[in-house]
Amino acid sequence: MLIRMARAALRSERSVLTVLGALLLLAALLACTGAALMARLSGAGEELLDRADAPDLVQMHAGELDEEEIDRFAEGRPEVSAHRVAPLLGIDGAELQLDGESQAGSVQEISLAVPDPERDLMLVAEDDSPLTEVEPGTVWLPVFHRTEQGIQVGSTLVITAPDGYRLELTVAGFVRDSTMNTPIAGSKRLAVAAQDLAAVAAHTGTFEHLISFWVEDPATDIAALRTAYQTQGLPSAGPLVDRSAFALFTVIAEGLVASVVLLAAALVLMVALLCLRLALRTALERDRRELAVMSVIGIAARDQRRVHLLVHGAVALAASTLGLLGALALEPLLSAGLTAYVGERGGPRMVLVPAAVAALLVGAVCASVELQLRRVQRTGPLAVLRGEGRTGTRPGRLRLHRSPLPVGISLGVMALLRRGGGTVLLTGVLAVSTVLVMLPSAVTSTLSSPQFSSYLGLGAEQLRLDIPHAGAADEERFAQAQRVLAEDPRVQAHSARVATHHLVTAADGTRLALPVISGDHVDAPGRHVEGRSPREPDEIALSLLAADEAGVGVGDRLAVEVAGQERALEVVGTYQDLTYGGLTAEGRLSTAGEQVLWYVLSATPAAGEHHDVLATELAAALPGVRVSDADDHREQLLGPLAERMRIAAGGAILAGLALAVLLSAMTSRLWLAAEAGPLAIRSALGASPASLRAPYLTRMLLSLAAGVLLGTALTLTAGQGLLNLMLEGMFGGIQRLFSGTSRVPLLIDPLTTALALPLALVAAVTITTLLVCRRIRTADVRTLTAE
Amino acid sequence: MRPRTDRPLLRARGLARSLGGRTVLHDIDLDVHAGEHLAVVGASGSGKSTLLHTLSGLEAPSAGTLRWAGEDLGALGEAQRARHRLLEIGVVFQQFHLLRTLTLFDNVVMPGLLARARPRREVLARGRELMAALGVDALAERGVGEASGGQLQRVAIARALINRPRLVVADEPTGALDTAAGEGVIDALAEVAAGGTALLVVTHDPAIAARASRIITMSDGRITGLEEVPVPAATSRAPIA
């Protein structure tokens, strides 16, 4: 009997169950894929760092150093169990050719290094064994070059020098370098033999040092060690990175993918459960009299519930099984990058975790069915037969005769207000659709906007010249660059800034190291979150991150050590900066006698000059100076991200529209099924087809209008917060999340994002509702007889 | 009873209706004149209700013609047919079929507001007047669940009359009521007929049939008898028009 009833339900509900099944399949596929990705990711970064015996804190330093000074520091810190100073030979991308391709345009900073056989291991990609020795004439590349550039074993790396020197090395294999592993880590180490390193160093390259520290106890406060290192005047011309950042860099790309997939799964599951609720309510509204009759003749409510449980449980089980199988096939494709960077990870959890998620999904569907049915069956069968127990069947507060609107519209408004819960739910999902349609598009236009460079601290200049300070030669390069820019008639204007190392005392008394960039600051519009650039030597502007770390705001005074003396400088502005780790300050300090970190020059080409030609020629005229076109710089840094976001935005727009269409179709169908009686009454009384459809269209459009408004507000507030959270995570690491150090406003394109996309949503929902309501034509008197 | 005019208000010729491959109405010829009071009687399943639904435009005939004041209703489009029902025909159902989401007063005035044929103020005033005439004015602000069956049927009659239709059709109007409530509804319908509106009532109740000027008997989807009855006694109350 039960099976026969279930079969009948399957037949009569075929179209609704198909849609529901498809949604559940998608939800299961996404949820199982996300779960499998998370299972693969969890601990992946840490495990790689353990295998490679990666350091807990690394200071990169460009220039000479006194190793004894480092030894003394390490000996004075009981928590430090080991330390190393390893030389790196930085090679300009223009002097490197990989498989014939110049690396001049690469944003990766490439160095040659001799692998350490004991600590900070480079692991051979094939078997994770440590690379202990490199044959002369060969080179081992980071897996980055294989994954991103398609370099193979046997390819050649050619190093050239301005003096005509040329060394050709054969690629012998690939290594996982735990501290500089993925593309997001901007530096790469190429493992070469000691004699090759020495040979190249004699002709080109700049020596840098990796100063690494290991601690014995994993619970050690790395931040304290970091502060101690920074405040003791030790070599610090370069970034200082800790183990948590290495782990984050390793898994952030796949972690973001997994998060997005899980978020999408949650959203689709929410819609699926909503549709399940609508489908069940539609079926129950339609069958309520039959169900009541069944109760009266003695079929237990439990058996009736079993029919629905059987049908929906079967659909959920089939969908989850297919979703699980799909996920097991899809997940390795999505985690291919992770596998390349951290190695093969597997085991039973790769199946067990997604299988558990699939089982949970079936459980969620069954629980939802049970809950819905119990609620409906609270009304006794005789009450149902008398037509009682339906929701929204009492007059609300509004009166039809007092409404100035046409009857159809008034009935729609009255129903909207009477059915508060349903309206809130519908509006909520339509708001989610709006966010899906608008937010990725707004993020894309923000990332693509030239204004965004200024938020990032890239400045408003058109050409930018960077010179890291590693010694006296760089000071000369800086002076020469200024001369070249001043004399070149193609350069209309230029400005120069010098970053020097200073110690500052935070509001809580702690000391921290801060690069202060002094020189000609440009107050570009939107550059400062608050205040302005410093104009006097006793003024300073801080990046949001620096202000946060120092615990000061605009108007406060900050103690900065200048020429060995502490001076209280007035904080006159804060600005968004994601360069140099986001921890910078702008000042007007004298740089004489200070430790110079880097130099920056900006140039504005004269009208009609081609930026790219000028940049290329300036780079040729100024060896060792990195010249970049600001647009090009932005493109290299953010282009790939913006491109991925553009694709994601396209997908999100389609998903948002599909969600809205599906929801409006399901909801309209429910309304028509639930209100078949009142519809027939109004039709019998002589309401025109247009008037019969008006209440449903009114309800849907008013819910949509509220949803679009709410969705837009959410996009501008929570969406903007999400973007800034993403930027904080991307540029500052996990420790910067929720620090408020990124305050980029969403730049919404008024034509597409604010107008065209909401209009597309309105059009999609209106057309869907109209199509569904087309079935309302004439009175079906038999409906009235059944009522 | 009013004198019959030459041209009937509603003329059916050769009217047939099929449902699911089964013919439930056969070759019906019938004239309904303005102001006349007809009763349709017959056993269950004889086609009484289908005849009423077809004549009132609630169901389309499968064959034959239906003319309203000489105009062919079959030539009208869907929206025009709906408008015809709204303005010319008032419908009273056995189960009242009032909208539960509206107050009783809103139920009464809704067809008037839908029609937009008269000013809103006039529609509302007529609604109050009809509810008072039918003795249900005190229930105006109540919901459907807050009135008795007899009261609801009188509200339904008020709704049927709001647009001053020329024909009111009633399908077993006392079928769901007890005797006392049924009598009140019979009186109300008689007052409608006395007010000059043509009335077509499908009934099992001999008391209702007895008040009609003509009684049509149906069997197996055909009209098998037509009986002219003497003019009924005048009602003691004012007619409802």
Image (cartoon, rainbow, N blue to C red):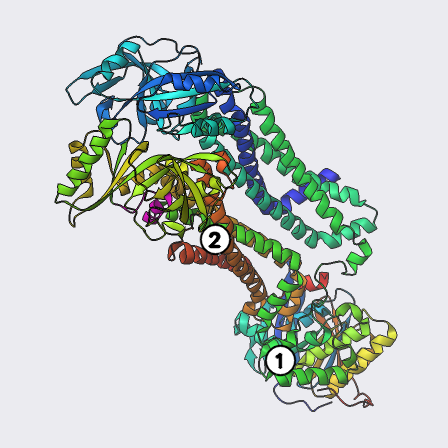
Q: Residue A364 appears in which quarter of the rendering?
A: top right
Q: Nearer the viewer, residue A201 or A370?
A: A201
Magenta-colored stretch includes residue A190: no
**Going 58% across and 46% down the picture, which residue do you hit?**
A271
Horizontal side, residue A505 vs residue A1: left or right: left
**Going 20% across and 40% down the picture, which residue do you hit?**
A612
Q: At label 1, which amino acid type do we have?
A: Glu
Q: Which residue is mark 1?
A: B88
> In the rendered picture of this protein, how many numbered marks are placed on residues?
2
Q: Which residue is mark 2?
A: A716
**Going 39% across and 9% down the picture, which residue do you hit?**
A132
Q: Position of residue A713 (x, y in %)?
A: 50, 55
Q: CA distance from mark 1 to mark 2?
A: 55 Å
Q: At label 2, which amino acid type do we have?
A: Leu
Q: Position of residue A298 (x, y in %)?
A: 84, 47
Which numbered mark, 1 or 2, is in the foreground of this view?
2
SS at circle 2: helix
Q: Nearer the viewer, residue A560 or A53?
A: A560
